Every structure is written in C-alpha cells, then in structure tokens.
Amino acid sequence: MGKRGPKPKKIIDTKWRPNLAYAIGLITTDGCLSSDGLLFDLTSKDREQLLNFSKCLNVDFKIGNKWNSKGDECLRIQFKNRVFYNFLLSIGLTPRKSLTIGKLAIPDKYFFDFLRGCFDGDGCFYSYWDPRWKSSHMFYLGFASASLKHLLWLQEEIEKRVNIKGHITGRKKNVFFQLKYAKKEALEIIKKMYYNQKVVCLSRKRIKIEKALVVEKEQQKEY
C-alpha cells in the first residue's frame, strides 16, 4: 500500500450567518488565539458547548482534555487554520485578548446570535424571591469580562438596538466586570437572543431561564 496523503485541511466558512455569529460569541468569551498566527483554543466544562461550536462551524473537531493550575479538568478544542485565524483578527480579536478586547465588527443582523454565544460563554442568569417585597420574583441577566472597554461596547450596542441601559458593576482584584440587566430589561434581551426554539444554545442556561419565566408568569396571574 502507498503512503497516505496529508489530512485534508478543515475548511471553515467565514460568510456571516447566525451560527457563525454564535460561534464568534463563544470564541470571544472562552477562546484563545496563540501568537503564532495559526492555533486556536476553545475551552469549556460543557461538552455540549464544544459540540455546538463544531456544529456552528460545520467541522467535526476533536475534543480533548485540559487541566488548569488547580488540577480541575476541562474540555477543549484546538485547531490550526490560518484563514480563520486571520478572519478573527479582522473583526477585532487578538492573542491575549482578555484584558484588552474592545469593540468587534459584528454585522447588525447577527448581533443577538453573537450575544447569545457570549452569554453561553461567560454570561449568567439567576432568579430569587426578594424578601423586602411580598411575592416579588426577581431575576438578572449578566455578561462578564475582564475588559471594561468590551463591556462598555456591549452595553452601547444593546442600548442602540433595544433601548435599555443595564449597569456595570465594579471590580475587585481577580474578579471580572459584569454588565447586568434586571427583569424587564433582561426580558428584552432574552426575546432577542432566543428568537425561535431552534437557535443553537447551551441547553442548561436556556432551561434555567425558561423555569424562571414560568415562575414569573404564574406570579403575574396572581396580581
């Protein structure tokens, strides 16, 4: 038998579409670009997150293991692709971006797909009953980053589209900034991010939101 030829390169379509915008959101939050101009790393504790990433880029990436300095295990995708790497640079992503990232060139049409990717990467959602008020169900939607400049850009872009302001919390040592939206404002973003049942997303976060919205709906019936 003759020698096998080289493995075919992974071809990644950089034409803007909802799934690409979502994948860029994941890269923005959980991704890392090496300084060699080729290598890209996406790390997550959720296998579904990495499977979604593969689905969105239409590439069957190999999922490996990674351990942090504390010995905690995570999952990751690593790949080399100069064309895709250059595309990421062209929209504003850079190596060692966590502290320096600012605005990104995301088409208006796909901004909320991108935002959903950011939410699934470094976003949070929580709900609770406020003890100060009778039957007061509260919830917050948030986005985290080590770069204040990036969160100010996100805040501005969201305000342009749905006319809500949110607020950014301060930072202590080794803690990220957070852009947070309460209840009515959060609902506006949720409707835009999950505009139909088929959008790619991290299911555990969507389920958490849906459960809180059921509680909210039941509360509204009582008043």
Image (cartoon, helix red, strand yellow):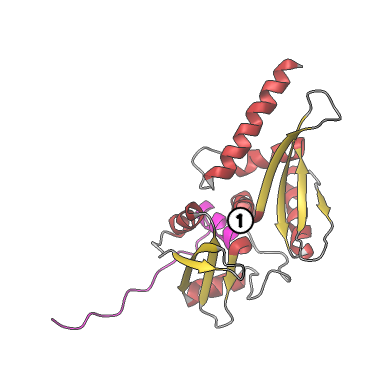
Quadrant of the rendered structure where residue 220 is? top right
> Which percent across, then down, holds residue 121?
61, 56
Determine the main secondary structure of the stretch shown in magenta: loop
> Which percent across, then down, holds residue 210?
60, 34
Q: Quadrant of the N terminus?
A: bottom left
Residue at 73% across, 53% down: 157
For this orientation, the residue located farthest to the front is: 71
> Which percent across, then down, holds residue 200?
51, 47
Give the magenta part as a residue range. Answer: 1-27
Residue 202, above or below 218: below
Quadrant of the rendered structure where residue 173 is? bottom right
Residue 54, above or below 138: below
Residue at 31% across, 75% down: 7
Residue 183 is a magenta residue: no
Quadrant of the rendered structure where residue 218 is? top right
Question: Is 10 displayed left or right of 96 in the figure?
Answer: left
> Which percent across, then down, holds residue 19?
51, 53
For this orientation, the residue located farthest to the top is: 222
Give the residue pinned by disc 1. 121
Disc tally is 1
Q: Residues within 10 Å of mark 1 (few under 14, many from 20)?
A: many
Residue 17 is a magenta residue: yes
Residue at 48% across, 70% down: 78
